[in-house]
Structures are given as structure tokens and as C-alpha cells.
């Protein structure tokens, strides 16, 4: 029979991994799927994992904000498309009619295009 693990083995291994399951497995000394089973079945392990993932997101946000403060326009534009949608910034295009109204929809029936050309 294989090694018996405890939840604490996984909880102790999670910090510093950025939530990379294979990194956790390496630190514990087990297979990737063993870590996955513990994450799926033990809420305390899952919470430690979620905390690590959130910590990495905080670090990434801090870096983006620092870059924006340093004048990085690419990061500023990216940030606006993600966080500034309520102000009209978006990374998708929307087509509208005159003055932002609806676009008229025209349904063409067979032969109508020929009539328009004439």
C-alpha cells in the first residue's frame, strides 16, 4: 500500500506553488491525481489552494497597477477593457444605428438583390 497522506501534508505544500497542482504534488511526493483527489474531497485543502490562487491574483493585479502608474499604456488599455466596461471601455465591438439606436434589419428574399441593382 502507498504512503498515507494527511490534509496537513497538502496544506503545508501549497504555499508558493501559485496553485500549480503538479508543483504541489512534487512538494508532497505524490502524483498529480492524488493532489486533485484531496482538493476535491477535503474542504480545508481546497481552501488553502483557493487562498494560494487568490494570492497570485493579488500579485498580478499589483504588478498591473504598478505598471499603469509607471505609464505602461498597454497595461492601462487592458485594465480598462476588463474593469472599465461600465464606463464604455470594452475589447469587443458593438454595432449600433444612428445615435446609438438599433440597426435596421432587412430581410432579402430571392431575387430582391437583383431588383436593387436595377
Image (cartoon, helix red, strand yellow):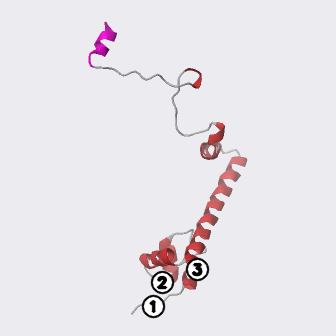
- Which element type, helix, strand or loop, lies under badge 1? loop
Q: Residue at x 55, y 73 (%)?
A: 46
First along the sequence among labels 2 and 3: 3
Name the disc covering residue 3, or none.
1
Q: Is residue 43 visible?
A: yes
Residue 118 at x, y percent in the picture: 31, 6
Residue farthest toward the left in the current orientation of the protein: 111
First in sequence: mark 2 vs mark 1: 1
- Residue on which the image places disc 3: 11
| Pick the front one: 38 or 25 | 38
Q: Are marks 2 and 1 in contact (CB under 8 Å)?
A: yes
Magenta span includes 35: no
Q: Is residue 40 above or below residue 29?
A: above
Q: Residues within 10 Å of mark 2 (few under 14, many from 20)?
A: some
Residue drawn 50% across and 75% down? Answer: 39
Image vertical order of residue 19 relative to residue 77, above or below:
below
Chief secondary structure of the magenta span?
helix
Q: Report whether 54 appears left or right of 20.
A: right
- The x and y percentages for residue 8 are 58, 84
Q: Which residues are magenta?
A: 110-118
Could you say where residue 96 lies in the image, as x and y percent from the top left? 53, 26
Q: Are marks 2 and 3 in contact (CB under 8 Å)?
A: no
What residue lies at 40% left-to-right and 21% top-to-bottom? 106
In the shown orientation, is residue 78 left or right of residue 70? left
Residue pictured at 69% horizontal, 47% vertical: 68
Mark 2 lies on residue: 29
Q: From the viewer's perspective, tell me whether residue 106 is left or right of residue 69.
A: left
Amino acid at each position: 500500500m502507498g504512503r498515507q497522506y494527511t490534509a496537513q501534508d497538502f496544506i503545508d505544500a501549497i504555499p508558493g506553488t501559485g496553485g500549480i497542482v503538479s508543483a504541489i504534488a512534487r512538494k508532497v511526493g505524490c502524483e498529480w491525481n492524488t493532489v486533485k483527489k484531496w482538493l476535491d474531497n477535503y474542504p480545508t485543502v481546497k481552501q488553502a489552494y483557493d487562498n494560494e490562487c487568490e494570492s497570485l491574483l493579488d500579485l498580478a493585479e499589483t504588478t498591473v497597477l504598478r505598471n499603469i502608474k509607471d505609464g505602461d499604456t498597454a497595461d492601462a488599455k487592458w485594465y480598462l477593457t476588463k474593469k472599465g466596461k461600465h464606463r464604455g471601455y470594452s475589447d469587443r465591438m458593438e454595432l449600433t444605428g444612428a445615435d446609438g439606436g438599433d440597426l435596421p434589419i432587412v430581410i432579402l428574399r430571392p431575387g430582391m438583390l437583383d431588383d436593387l441593382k436595377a
